[in-house]
Image (cartoon, rainbow, N blue to C red):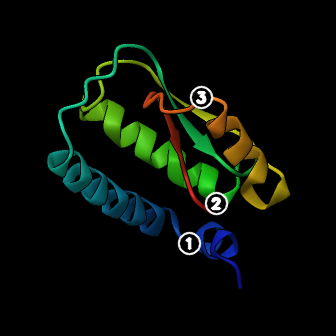
Amino acid sequence: MNMQAVIVGLTAGARIAAGWLVIALFQSAIAAAPAWKPEKAVELIAPSAAGGGTDLTARTIQKILQDKRWVGVPLAVVNKPGGGGNVALAYLSQHGADRHYLGMAK
């Protein structure tokens, strides 16, 4: 069974718990990294279609980050399905080292 099927099969509560886990990991990574303050809108790139498992996780992360006001700029989820995640990776690589584009893994 692939991870997307597992995530889609989870209850809403389990998806929220998974989102909180990702947020906790995100926070620890931010604490270890130099301070980053986004200067423009941030894109969270999901390598799945809208409604897919990665999309649902990305939207949970988006909601938590915005509700807690941890990101002071707009945070959009951008879906780039196809190619087993390669379409999303190609889109992400077009933006080089711009930290306003964040990729999700499948």
Asked whether the viewer can see residue 32, the reply is yes
Q: Which residue is mark 1?
A: 10
Tell me the quarter of the image containing the N terminus.
bottom right
Horizontal and vertical percent for residue 18?
41, 65
Q: Residues within 10 Å of mark 2 (few under 14, many from 20)?
A: many
Instruction: From the viewer's side, name the closer residue of 60 and 11.
Output: 60
Horizontal and vertical percent for residue 5?
69, 73
Horizontal and vertical percent for residue 40?
42, 14
Give the structural element (helix, strand or loop) at label 2. Answer: helix
Instruction: From the viewer's side, name the closer residue of 24 and 96.
Output: 96
Q: Earlier in the sequence, mark 1 or mark 2?
A: 1
Residue 46 shown left or right of residue 70 in the figure: right
Q: Earlier in the sequence, mark 3 or mark 1?
A: 1
Q: Residues within 10 Å of mark 3 (few under 14, many from 20)?
A: few
Is the residue 33 above or below the residue 52 in the image? Answer: above
Q: Residue at 53% of width from left, 69% of height from top?
A: 11
Horizontal and vertical percent for residue 24?
25, 58
Q: Which residue is mark 2?
A: 53
Q: Residue at 60% of width from left, 40% of height from top?
A: 45
Give the structural element (helix, strand or loop) at label 3. Answer: loop
| Number of the label disc, if any, that sits on residue 95 | 3
Q: Amino acid at mark 1?
A: Leu
Q: Residues within 10 Å of mark 1 (few under 14, many from 20)?
A: few
Q: Amino acid at mark 3?
A: His
Q: Nearer the viewer, mark 3 or mark 1?
A: 3
Q: Amino acid at mark 2?
A: Gly
Q: CA distance from mark 2 to mark 3?
A: 24 Å
Q: CA distance from mark 3 to mark 1?
A: 33 Å
Q: Residue at 36% of width from left, 59% of height from top?
A: 22
Marks 1 and 2: CB-CB under 8 Å? no
Is the residue 43 above or below the residue 2 in the image? Answer: above
Q: Residue at 58% of width from left, 52% of height from top?
A: 56
